[in-house]
Image: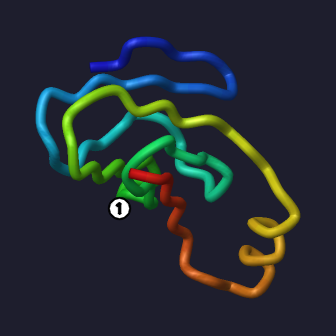
């Protein structure tokens, strides 16, 4: 369930662990507070979490992620758990 949605922040509440599709356009700059965010086959966000609870994703561009994009590294963004 989406708890809040803003231009640069999305907060979701999950009742159980698993993989969830968020209807928000994927970018390697989305940084989750827990779990991992990857690009879903339809270009949206796929969020995989190991524990139930709230997860905040913030849009956080950084030089490190920009260089990873230029280097062609896999697009995956993980938070701490």
The color scheme shown is: rainbow
Which residue in the rendered view is the most extreme toward the left? 16
- Outermost residue toward the front in this view: 81
The extreme right residue here reads 63
The front one of 66 and 50 is 50
x, y percent for residue 58 = 62, 35
Q: Is residue 72 left or right of residue 76?
A: right
Residue at the image point whose x is 35% and y is 26% from the top: 54
User: How dense is the environment of label 1, judged by Cα within 10 Å: few (below 14), some, or many (20 and up)?
Assistant: few
Please state if 46 lies on the left or on the right of 25 as rendered. left
Report the side of 61 relative to 2 (left or right): right
Q: Disc count in the image? A: 1
When asked about the image quadrant of residue 69, the answer is bottom right
Would you place residue 14 above or below residue 29 in this image? above
Name the quarter where the N terminus is drawn. top left
Seen at 47% across and 12% down, the residue is: 4
63, above or below 43, in the image? below
Percent x, y for residue 55? 40, 33
Name which quarter of the figure residue 39 lies in: bottom left
Q: Residue at x 80, y 69 (%)?
A: 64
Query: How far from the left and from the top, in percent, is residue 35?
Result: 37, 52
Secondary element under disc 1, as helix, strand or loop, is loop
**Residue hosting label 1:** 41
């Amino acid at each position: 369930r989406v708890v809040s949605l803003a231009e640069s922040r999305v907060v979701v509440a999950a009742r159980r662990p698993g993989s969830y599709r968020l209807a928000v356009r994927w970018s390697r700059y989305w940084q989750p507070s827990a779990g991992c965010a990857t690009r879903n086959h339809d270009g949206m966000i796929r969020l995989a979490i190991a524990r139930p609870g709230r997860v905040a994703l913030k849009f956080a561009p950084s030089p490190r992620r920009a260089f990873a994009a230029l280097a062609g590294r896999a697009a995956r963004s993980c938070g701490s758990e």
